[in-house]
Amino acid sequence: MPKAPASNILLRFLPSVDELLRTEVGQTVGRATGEGYAAVLARRSIEEIRQNIVSMANANPSKNQLLNEAEEKLSNLWGSEQLMSVKRVINATGVIIHTNLGRAPLSAAARRALIEEAGGYCTLEYDLETGKRGMRAPQSELLIRHLTGAEAALVVNNCAAAAFFVLTVFAAGGAVVISRGELVEIGGDFRVPDVLAQSGAVLREVGTTNRTSLADYERAIGDDARVILRVHPSNYRIIGFTSSPPLAQLAALARKREILFYEDIGSGALNDLGIYGLKDEPTVAGSISAGVDIVTFSGDKLIGGPQSGIIAGRSELIEQLRSHPLYRALRVDKLTNAALEATLDAYRRGAENDIPVMSMVAQNKETIAGRAAKFLSQLNIDVAGPLKFEMIDGVSAIGGGAAPGSELNTVLIAVSHENINASSIEHALRRGDRPVVSRIENGRVLLDLRTVQPDEEGDLLDVLRSVV
Ligand SMILES: *Cc1c(COP(=O)(O)O)cnc(C)c1O
């Protein structure tokens, strides 16, 4: 395309990096990020304008306008880079284990442990008694054994890593027998058939999508079968005409045929959550006592700890994993170990309520209604004004791969405005100094206090006041 004659002259009007850094925005960015990085952003801003001048030959801006434009670009560039950093938010969605928001918020003890115990030098692999190298974080393993009844345990980066590890070490080169009803995708790209393929095992599907019998498993175990795999379908349910053999029967079959019985239980509750209305969440202890050889579960789902994958089971199997070269690549760091230890310690003390996930699960509708009423009275809004706050019945979700039927009754605060639509309100809540993440239903913004921690209510009040 022939270049318009004016563009060469215009290019000479472009501000220099120094000129841009001397503007008000340039100075602000420079103070925040240092001169070197501010210059990088300034150069990128000016370059963008250069491209625009070349492609839009008809425009005829002055030198000053170009400088203003560069200043605005620099401001936007800096603003969008700041949004990329990990930033604390208030989760008002009512989804307790919100994967996009970092899953489980840590307990006060876990936060303290990861800063005060593990933030500096610590006993990650050091035995204070002997003054020599010790086991890596033995306390987490001790706690897992105590809380699940397993003979031994090992901690890796997440449950996907745990599943991949177990299958790679125990099933590679052989077949893994699994029900067709459990070939699921958990979300976040965890697909059981893909994990199996990657581990070098052959998938042997048995039964049908809705029904699989013990005899189906029995027939499928040939000479090459190494593992019977049971996967908790987590966020997916087939309901109605369904059946699968109980764990104890599969465990007996695996023993008889001298192969492993491995269960990927996913969320891995440590306590029976039936008292809170969550009937479908299996416990790790239940799997161990039913005779499962190895069970894997996430540290940051219902357990309420840091991202981690826990492998529990028979000690000779766990020791095989521990001495495998892959363990070196999958093991967790000191921060995770410290936070996990502190989380598990709360279960040992019977202080589950100290764990935010557990206390959010445990709150009943009346408690939340009480909190919501008090919250609205503190908000002190003109009831005749254009902005409306109402309390309505609704449900919170467990999230993080919990059963789809696992919903908890709650009371929501519905926010609406005569002249401002719900998505503008939702956006404004998200874009404040303390971002608030909410949801929209039927043209109203909904806030669920179940997932707002009591010590965040003051901040939430401030955000709502500033938005309205
Ligand atoms: C969530 C889940 C996983 C993946 O766990 P991450 O900790 O996210 O890696 C694997 N299996 C099951 C059954 C799950 O529910």
Image: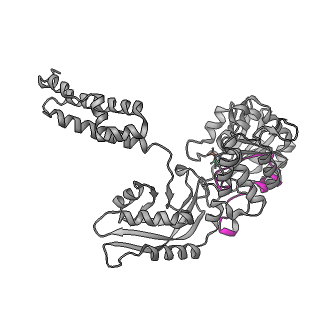
Q: How many marks?
A: 0
- Determine whether, in the image, residue 140 is placed left or right of residue 8: right
Closer to the camera in the image, 104 or 205:
104
Q: Residue furthest top?
A: 2
Say above or below: 227 vs 387. above
Position of 212 relative to 451 (above/below): above
**Image quadrant where residue 322 sits:** top right
**Is residue 255 something that shows in the picture?**
yes
Determine if residue 208 is in view: no
Image quarter (top left, top right, bottom left or bottom right) of the C terminus: bottom left
Magenta stretch: residue 280 in it? Answer: yes
Q: Residue at x 63, y 49 (%)?
A: 209
Tell me residue 64's x, y (percent). 18, 36
Displayed quadrant of residue 293: top right
Q: Give the image's coloring scheme.
A: one colour
Q: Where are the magenta residues, as a range?
A: 275-304
Q: Nearer the viewer, residue 363 or 78?
A: 78
Q: Position of residue 453 (x, y in %)?
A: 56, 63
Image quadrant in which you'd find residue 160: top right
Q: Quadrant of the N terminus?
A: top left
